[in-house]
Image: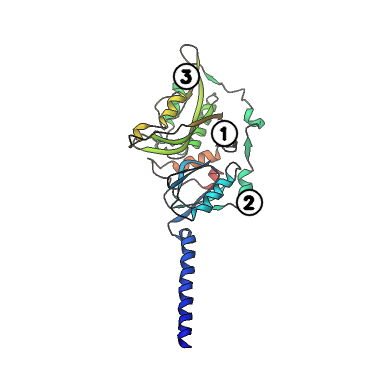
Amino acid sequence: MEKYSNLRLLFWCVSMVLVLNSCSSESGYAKNEKVTELAKWAPFEIKIKDQKAIVGFVESPVPFEFDLTANHHKNDIRLIENVIGSDTPVRIFVYKGTSHIAKIEPATQNDILNYRKDLVSANSEIMNRPDPLLVSIFPDEAALANIYTMIVNNSCANTNFQEGCMTFQYATDGCNARAHKMKQLLNANGYNCQKHYVFGGLLASAGTCCVQWIYHTAPLVLVRNSNNIIEERILDPSLFATAVTPEVWRAACQNMACVLNPDFEFEPVTYKTVPGIVFHYNPSSMSFRLDSDYFRTDCTLEVYQHQSGCAFPNPIPPDNCQN
């Protein structure tokens, strides 16, 4: 009888070990001390390549990735696929200090309602309302060069990192805020602008390092050239010392000088021009977030004011900066 009791006890112990190990393998990554909740953002795309899944979120140009060798990511990927195109944020948990996703959880209904409350659609009246007080075309290249110099002079590097400076020294993130701050300066000087977005596997030189993006954006303006022809120009001091054409700008976002593999080829990009009042653009739902009072803009720039190089953001702007 004692023999059977001992066997029963042994069986119970082994069973508990198996159960605990099973629980650990399914949720242990969430309890890892290196895992932290990053943000509540809306995904707009997910691409699976080799053993990785690359996710694009509306609020940041940083590409985030899953390791597909980990079985627990199947539900995470399914959740992302289900919400793309619906302006639905998810809770993102990453391994601290990296863009590697540890897990994804659904946002609460309240989070979703708060996220959607101030989104506007492409056919909204406010998106198609021109400002009669703003000039839509720069009269010549000299006038545009003067404004570009003014923008550069308001960079953090040229203002000794004073409050409200433009964070061109940190290209990794914050392009939405930089573009919107440039739009504010253009408007203050009487000029209108649009925003130009490029989407794809992007790799650009930020001077001393190369940065990966899943999208990038900057202001687009019109200028009358010396032949009296109206042309488009992109304003982006994070990449260029002068205004450039959209074609040159997009090419710089896929810079072969940043590629080590000689057999590597960039995939084709997609691009879109939207009204200048746009702060965030979701290409999967064609919805927009505005920042008319520049709160999100200034909040984001303040966070990145003293960051530089191409490292992962640390810290990132809080949710009220982004959503």
Image point 38% across, 32% down: which residue?
255
Disc on the earlier residue, 3 or 2? 2
Q: Which residue is mark 2?
A: 110
Badge 3 amino acid: Ala
Q: Residue at x 39, y 43 (%)?
A: 311
- Point 44% across, 21% down: residue: 145
Which quadrant holds the C terminus? top right
Report which quarter residue 43 is drawn in. top right
Judge from the rendering whether residue 294 lies leftward or rightward of residue 202; answer left or right.
right
* Mark 1 lies on residue: 278
Secondary element at image label 2: helix
Number of numbered tags placed on the structure image? 3
Q: Residues within 10 Å of mark 2 (few under 14, many from 20)?
A: few
Does residue 158 lie above or below 108 as drawn? above
Q: How is the image coloured?
A: rainbow
Residue 239: % across, % down:
40, 31
Residue type, numbered disc 1 = Val
Q: Residue furthest bottom?
A: 1
- Residue 1 vs residue 127, the one in the foreground: 1
Q: Residues within 10 Å of mark 1 (few under 14, many from 20)?
A: many
Q: Residue at x 51, y 47 (%)?
A: 318
Q: Which residue is mark 3?
A: 143
In the rendered structure, which amino acid carries the disc numbered 2?
A: Asn
Above/below status of 251 relative to 214 = above
Alpha carbon separation for disc pair 1 and 3: 24 Å
